[in-house]
Image (cartoon, grey):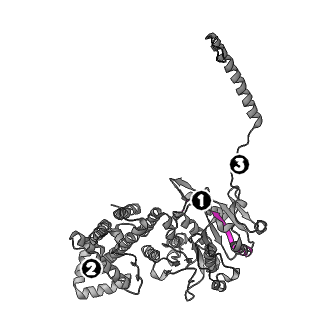
């Protein structure tokens, strides 16, 4: 029997049903995703251990668990096996703490939540610290799981039992990473406004990834930076558009270097898990838990990247202290973005870290295109330097966290003619219930139009610098692209003719009615003769 990625998605989402009944999505996602990650790691270790001991794949996880337990009972065998597993995975899970072992304990009625809590801690302290703090948000004592220890134990046991029925080894190699991404998107859909904290819709991520890799897709060791990386979904899209040189055996896809910052610890850990399940080696992951604006990327690591991608929180307050005026990210603009709206602060931060040959794509609310004051001054300075390359208007209602219209601002450091290409993509969507969706055909149209950089009536316009200057550096899309539909003209003569015709018809009807009433002996005006 063959299993598909869709089957895996359905099985994992079914496991969420156990938690969906008792807590909100933004809470239970941390528990479910933590358990999924631990099972994936545990199953990989079981299968790898079996192959090391028997030089073949196991029939199933149950067989692998049995052999693993036998190896654990022999001190010499376990010492050698443990060393090999730690070298390959950064940790070796004890036979009594594998996911399969927990399932057995549940069936034997010996499972205790403390067991899994200890297992998580063992993984976190193992190896070179690659798993450090990974399960910080998995609180087995939280009342969200149940008011009593028995109820908490019962809930986690039910979820483990559902997940235990899934053998990840039966699915295509990339299926688990994709399924993890699917779960994150489903949680985002249920979380509403809180979704913006950790997820960028797949379609938007795809469009931005295609834009920033355009012209750079054959670069080996491509570097991408997301200063507000959330779950890492936007970062991970990049490798889908990097081209391998199959003829010469050059694998560029798996040489992409990922750099990301995330302020919230639980979301930061989610990004780490997402990277690992997408089989990104630790040497290519450079993720930091920190405030992007307050604590810039450390200078002892690469600080300029081939691409910068961002979907920051919109119009968020930030600490615009005077000291930032001397910060190289903001100093060239003489003024700081307003403390009440960090949109341009995020933009300038990301742009500072862009290579001279790179491309940046950032999602922002439309207000950045036309707001005055300090923001207007910063926008004018960017335009005078030719740094704003394109503005792509997106449909309203495509994000889980907000219904406001947004746009993608594309920036480059090498745009000598200082022109700006505008695309009005506000009508490129498919409506489903209360949400709008970008389908592949919409993404393709937006991307090919961006690449062509040519005028399309009522859709796209290449504005010269002089044109932008005449508009006082206002980038509001309707100033450059008139996408309004002309109202159908009214033919006054035809209307008068129609009214005259109706009047004649009315007279004919009145005459017939008068004749009819006369035959009945009734005056047409209403009097009886």
Crowding around mark 1 (Cα neighbors within 10 Å: few <14, some 14 to 19, many 20+) is many
Q: CA distance from mark 1 to mark 3?
A: 21 Å
Q: Which residues are magenta?
A: 381-399
Crowding around mark 2 (Cα neighbors within 10 Å: few <14, some 14 to 19, many 20+) is many
Residue occupying image coordinates x 69% and y 79%: 335
Classify residue 478 by image quadrant.
Answer: bottom right
- How far across and down, in percent of the image, does residue 153 sit? 28, 71
Q: CA distance from mark 2 to mark 3?
A: 72 Å
Disc 2 target residue: 95
- How far across and down, in percent of the image, does residue 466 sit? 79, 68
| Relative side of 230 to 73, left or right | right
Crowding around mark 3 (Cα neighbors within 10 Å: few <14, some 14 to 19, many 20+) is few
User: Which mark is in front, 2 or 3?
Assistant: 3
Tell me if residue 132 comes above or below residue 504 in the rendering.
below
The answer to whether residue 213 is magenta is no
Disc 3 target residue: 486
| Relative side of 446 to 175, left or right | right
Disc 1 target residue: 395
- How far across and down, in percent of the image, does residue 386 sit? 72, 74
């Amino acid at each position: 029997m063959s299993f598909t990625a869709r089957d895996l998605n359905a099985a994992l989402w079914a496991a969420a049903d156990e938690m969906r009944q008792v807590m909100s999505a933004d809470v239970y996602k941390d528990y479910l995703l933590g358990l999924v990650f631990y099972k994936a790691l545990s199953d990989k270790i079981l299968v790898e251990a079996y192959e090391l001991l028997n030089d073949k794949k196991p029939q199933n996880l149950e067989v692998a668990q049995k052999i693993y337990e036998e190896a654990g009972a022999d001190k010499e065998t376990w010492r050698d096996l443990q060393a090999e597993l730690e070298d390959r995975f950064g940790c070796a899970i004890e036979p009594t703490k594998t996911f399969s072992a927990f399932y057995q304990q549940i069936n034997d009625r010996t499972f205790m939540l403390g067991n899994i809590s200890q297992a998580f801690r063992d993984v976190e302290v193992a190896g070179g610290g690659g798993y450090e703090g990974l399960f910080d948000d998995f609180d087995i004592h939280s009342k969200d799981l149940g008011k009593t220890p028995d109820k908490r134990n019962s809930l986690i046991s039910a979820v483990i039992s559902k997940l235990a029925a899934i053998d990840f080894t039966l699915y295509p190699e990339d299926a688990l990473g994709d399924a993890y991404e699917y779960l994150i998107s489903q949680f985002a859909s249920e979380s509403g406004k809180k979704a913006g904290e950790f997820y960028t819709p797949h379609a938007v991520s795809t469009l931005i990834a295609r834009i920033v890799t355009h012209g750079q897709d054959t670069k080996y060791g491509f570097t991408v930076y997301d200063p507000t990386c959330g779950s890492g979904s936007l970062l991970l899209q990049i490798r889908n558009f990097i081209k391998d040189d199959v003829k010469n055996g050059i694998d560029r896809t798996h040489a992409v270097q990922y750099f990301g910052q995330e302020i919230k610890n639980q979301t930061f850990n989610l990004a780490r898990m997402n990277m690992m399940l997408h089989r990104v080696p630790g040497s290519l992951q450079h993720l930091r838990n920190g405030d992007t604006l307050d604590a810039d990327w450390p200078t002892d690591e690469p600080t300029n990247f081939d691409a910068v991608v961002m979907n920051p929180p919109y119009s968020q307050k930030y600490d615009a202290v005077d000291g930032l005026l001397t910060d190289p990210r903001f100093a060239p603009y003489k003024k700081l973005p307003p403390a009440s709206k960090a949109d341009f602060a995020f933009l300038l931060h990301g742009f500072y870290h862009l290579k001279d040959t790179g491309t940046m794509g950032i999602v922002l609310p439309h207000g950045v295109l036309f707001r005055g004051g300090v923001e207007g001054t910063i926008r004018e300075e960017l335009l005078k330097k030719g740094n704003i390359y394109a503005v792509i208007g997106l449909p309203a209602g495509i994000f889980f966290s907000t219904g406001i219209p947004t746009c993608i601002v594309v920036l480059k450091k090498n745009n000598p003619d200082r022109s700006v290409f505008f695309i009005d993509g506000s009508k490129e969507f498919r409506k489903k219930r209360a949400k709008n969706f970008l389908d592949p055909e919409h993404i393709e149209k937006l991307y090919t139009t961006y690449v062509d950089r040519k005028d399309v009536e009522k859709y796209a316009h290449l504005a010269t610098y002089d044109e932008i200057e005449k508009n006082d550096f206002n980038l509001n899309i309707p100033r450059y692209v008139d996408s309004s539909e002309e109202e159908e003209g009214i033919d006054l003569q035809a209307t008068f003719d129609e009214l005259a015709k109706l009047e004649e018809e009315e007279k004919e009807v009145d005459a017939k009615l008068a004749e009819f009433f006369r035959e009945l002996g009734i005056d047409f005006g209403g009097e009886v003769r």
